[in-house]
Amino acid sequence: MKQCWGEAPERRPSFEEIFHKFKTINKGKKTNIIDSMLRMLEQYSSNLEDLIRERTEELEVEKQKTEKLLSQMLPPSVAEALKTGGTVEPEYFDQVTIYFSDIVGFTTISALSEPIEVVDLLNDLYTLFDAVLGNHDVYKVRSTWAWGSNHP
């Protein structure tokens, strides 16, 4: 079918070649060429609809991931403006607080723990911290993890 739609006429199959291909597809049985073409078009259409449905679902999943990431990284008003294609005006705040924290003994804890235990500990700690922030009118810009030696 695709060869029949080719732009270059010399690359399109002749009617004899098309008839021969239909005979091969139908395993030698005599059938009406129009019925065969319609059957193939229906199958092609069905496959195309399935493919479009699958790709649309994949696109929706990726869109949800992107929106979740945006909402985690940015204040809700900024994330919404970006999603709708709007502009984001800079804001001024009279007061801000920058909070630095340290886990006392983290190096020792890490050395005595399995990697997944360290990840779970940090995840639990930051989840609790985020829950506290959720009870107040604050916005966490980001968490920065730094570990290693105490270089100035």
Image: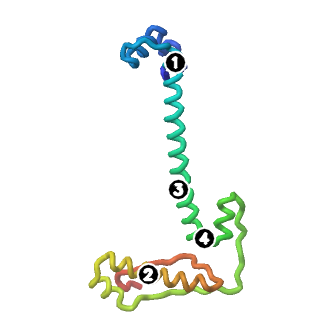
- Give the residue at mark 1: 35
Distance of label 3 from label 2 (alpha carbons): 26 Å
Instruction: Give the image location of residue 60, x and y in percent.
Output: 56, 53
Q: Secondary structure at mark 3?
A: helix
Query: Looking at the image, which residue sits at the far left?
Result: 112
For label 3, count other residues whose C-alpha is less than 10 Å away and answer few (under 14), some (14-19) or many (20+). few
For label 1, count other residues whose C-alpha is less than 10 Å away and answer few (under 14), some (14-19) or many (20+). few
> What amino acid does circle 1 point to?
Asp
* Label at residue 124: 2
Which is more N-terminal, label 1 or label 3?
A: 1
Distance of label 3 from label 1 (alpha carbons): 39 Å
Quarter holding the C terminus?
bottom left
Q: In the rendered view, would you say 8 is above or below 110?
A: above
- Give the residue at mark 3: 61
The one nearer the camera, 49 or 59, is 49
Distance of label 1 from label 2 (alpha carbons): 64 Å
